[in-house]
């Protein structure tokens, strides 16, 4: 059984928030929905929760219409990016509150709340108020309240977005275990972070400008992005994509640069294509390689990102170590044809390494 959407559409003030969305979310699996800001992720979650009406389409849970079911009859728990806790209640009562609303006794609700608080590593914090907790701990309280309900559908709207980098890393590891204990619930987790989507999801759904572009196993989506838009969304930094052609058994790029045609592209006919390569697959080369001009460089942790302008377009390199590059300096860039993706004129993938 599953939550099935067919052709969900929503337009507000001529802006298309949901554009003919169709997908299936299976029970017992963790689905991550990745997309940039304003891709429509929150709108979709609000639609599933019953907080947003759509113009057209169908949404069914286990074969029954979900769109016509009132909000209060939908067994849905939701965790927001901006964690929401009741400031006048203790941590324990924050988590127990929805259980009391469902008719459980005080003792039973609190017992279940304590068990969930232990799962999110908040044992010993039961009597504190939310204001006495760190941001990460407050988000854990909001998460515990949703988990305690054991809802049919669990929706998480970028729940780690407001946490610092180290805390996000730590909580990603924990979340995978927490969600695996949700039985046959349907779990949908939204994020803008490719690493988060790939790490957490059994199934990854890629959304862009209100449309669902691809859905599948994390490795399938990463290894075979269906379009250039998918390739941009699921890579950080976005995959480099440049225009070129296949002619005379070679890849022809701008500025008279040619590359050997790799084995995985030998079935492609001559013509115009777009070629993609991840930043991490590019390397600093030698004088015989493409020469690019540095337009920007930045150090992030133990890696350096170099933005260069080449005769066939801009590229971003991601190299290990801390390096300094002067603005407008010339750097050689080595492109390995065996790591290139090829996309057709319609932006769809036609060959992958």
Image: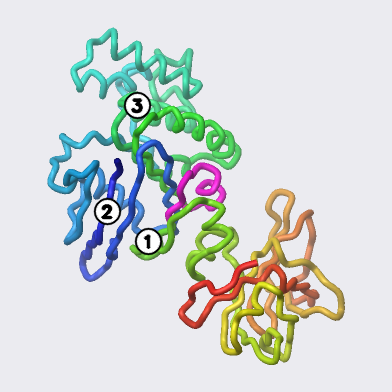
Which residue position holds label 3? Answer: 145
Separation (CA) of disc 3 from disc 1: 30 Å
Image disc number at residue 5? 2
Considering only order in the chain, which callout, 1 or 2, is on the residue closer to the N terminus?
2
The location of residue 146, given as percent across then percent down, is 34, 30
Which residue position holds label 1? Answer: 212
Separation (CA) of disc 2 from disc 1: 11 Å
Magenta-span inclusion, residue 158? no
Residue 55: quarter of image: bottom left
Mark 3 burial class by Cα count in 10 Å: few <14, some 14-19, many 20+ = many
| Residue at screen point 52% across, 51% down | 218
The answer to the question of whether label 3 and label 1 lie on touching residues, with beta carbons closer than 8 A, is no
- What residue span does the magenta drawing correspond to? 192-205
Quadrant in which the C terminus appears: bottom right
| Residue at screen point 74% across, 73% down | 335
352 over 121 or under it: above or below: below
């Amino acid at each position: 059984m599953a939550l099935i959407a067919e052709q969900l559409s929503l337009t507000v003030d001529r802006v298309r928030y949901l554009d003919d969305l169709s997908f299936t979310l299976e029970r017992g699996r963790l689905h991550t929905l990745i997309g940039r800001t304003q891709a429509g992720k929150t709108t979709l979650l609000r639609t599933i929760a019953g907080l947003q009406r759509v113009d057209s389409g169908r949404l069914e849970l286990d074969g029954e219409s979900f769109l016509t079911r009132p909000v209060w009859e939908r067994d849905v728990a939701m965790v927001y990016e901006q964690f929401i806790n009741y400031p006048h209640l203790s941590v324990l009562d924050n988590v127990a509150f929805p259980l009391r609303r469902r008719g459980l006794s005080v003792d039973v609700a609190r017992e279940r709340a304590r068990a969930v608080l232990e799962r999110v590593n908040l044992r010993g914090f039961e009597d504190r108020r939310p204001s006495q907790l760190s941001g990460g701990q407050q988000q854990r309280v909001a998460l515990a309240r949703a988990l305690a309900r054991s809802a049919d559908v669990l929706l998480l709207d970028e729940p780690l977005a407001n946490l610092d980098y180290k805390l996000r890393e730590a909580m990603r590891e924990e979340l995978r275990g927490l969600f695996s204990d949700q039985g046959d619930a349907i779990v949908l987790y939204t994020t803008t972070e490719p690493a988060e989507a790939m790490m957490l999801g059994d199934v990854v759904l890629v959304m862009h400008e209100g449309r669902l572009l691809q859905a599948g196993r994390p490795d399938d989506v990463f290894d075979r992005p269906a379009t250039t838009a998918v390739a941009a969304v699921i890579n950080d930094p976005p995959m480099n994509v440049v225009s070129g052609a296949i002619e005379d058994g070679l890849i022809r790029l701008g500025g008279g640069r040619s590359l050997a045609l790799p084995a995985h592209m030998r079935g492609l006919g001559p013509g115009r294509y777009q070629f993609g390569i991840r930043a991490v697959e590019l390397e600093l080369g030698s004088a015989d390689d493409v020469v690019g001009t540095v337009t920007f460089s930045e150090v992030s942790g133990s890696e350096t990102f170099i933005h260069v302008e080449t005769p066939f377009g801009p590229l971003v390199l991601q190299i290990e170590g801390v390096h300094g590059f002067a603005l407008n300096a010339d750097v050689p860039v080595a492109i390995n044809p065996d790591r290139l993706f090829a996309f057709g004129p319609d932006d769809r993938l036609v060959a992958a390494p």
